[in-house]
Amino acid sequence: MILHSLIAEFEHEVKSTRKLLQAVPEKDLAYKPSPISWSMGELAQHIATIYYWYVGTLTKDVYDMTADNLERGEPADIKATLDLFERNVEKARDALTSISEENLKDQWTMKVGDSTVLGPLPRAAVVRGFLFNHIYHHRGEMIVYLRATGNKVPGMYGPTHEESTPGK
């Protein structure tokens, strides 16, 4: 029951994430709202990368981020980031659809080398908090970046303010 809901949400939200990443213009990839912020290109790449983490979350009981290696490409190349996103979505989908309802109850831990940074937690809580909510958080940031640079924000849960306000 929970797994079926997670898969349905995943499929729905992938479409929204794709629309958002497709709205990121090449001309603004270097934009940073502050000196300590990621650039728009780095943020887009991070969103695409989170989908890669589904594999380690769903196939390993202990996921060591330092033991994993993902080729990301250049954050200043939005086409490369979109390709990364599509490849990672396929890996995430495969991992999510191959797990069982019972596996969602298993304890899961994330490490960075010898340091535990998350968990142990039930895998279902990690899917919801570390994966889904993490993506939603960064999508919200991207919306702010797009608006700050005068770009159009795609509607993801219905029309945006700009789409629903005459003259905008």
Image: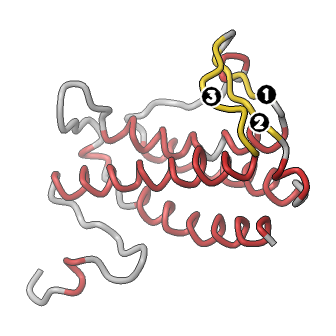
With respect to residue 167, does 134 lie above or below? above
Residue shown at the point (69%, 9%) measured from the top left = 114
Badge 3: how crowded within 10 Å, few (<14), some, or many (20+)?
Answer: few
Instruction: Please state which amino acid type lies under the numbered disc 2.
Output: Trp
Badge 1: how crowded within 10 Å, few (<14), some, or many (20+)?
Answer: some
Residue shown at the point (63%, 69%) measured from the top left = 9
- Image quadrant assignment for residue 55: top right
Provide residue 82's location: percent of width, then percent of height: 52, 50
Q: Which mark's residue is nearer the viewer, 1 or 3?
A: 1
Relative horizontal placement of residue 29, taking residue 73 as reference (left or right) = left
Instruction: Please state which amino acid type lies under the numbered disc 3.
Output: Glu
- Structural distance between the alpha carbons of marks 2 and 1: 6 Å
Q: Residue 71's mark?
A: 3
- Structural distance between the alpha carbons of marks 1 and 3: 21 Å
Instruction: Please state which amino acid type lies under the numbered disc 1.
Output: Val
Residue shown at the point (15%, 59%) measured from the top left = 150
Badge 2: how crowded within 10 Å, few (<14), some, or many (20+)?
Answer: many
Q: Residue 108's mark?
A: 2
Label 2 SS: strand
- Structural distance between the alpha carbons of marks 2 and 3: 25 Å
Q: Which residue is mark 1?
A: 62
Along the polypeptide, which appears first: circle 1 or circle 3? 1
Provide residue 3's location: percent of width, then percent of height: 79, 65
With respect to residue 129, does 69 lie above or below? above
Relative horizontal placement of residue 104, taking residue 88 as reference (left or right) = right
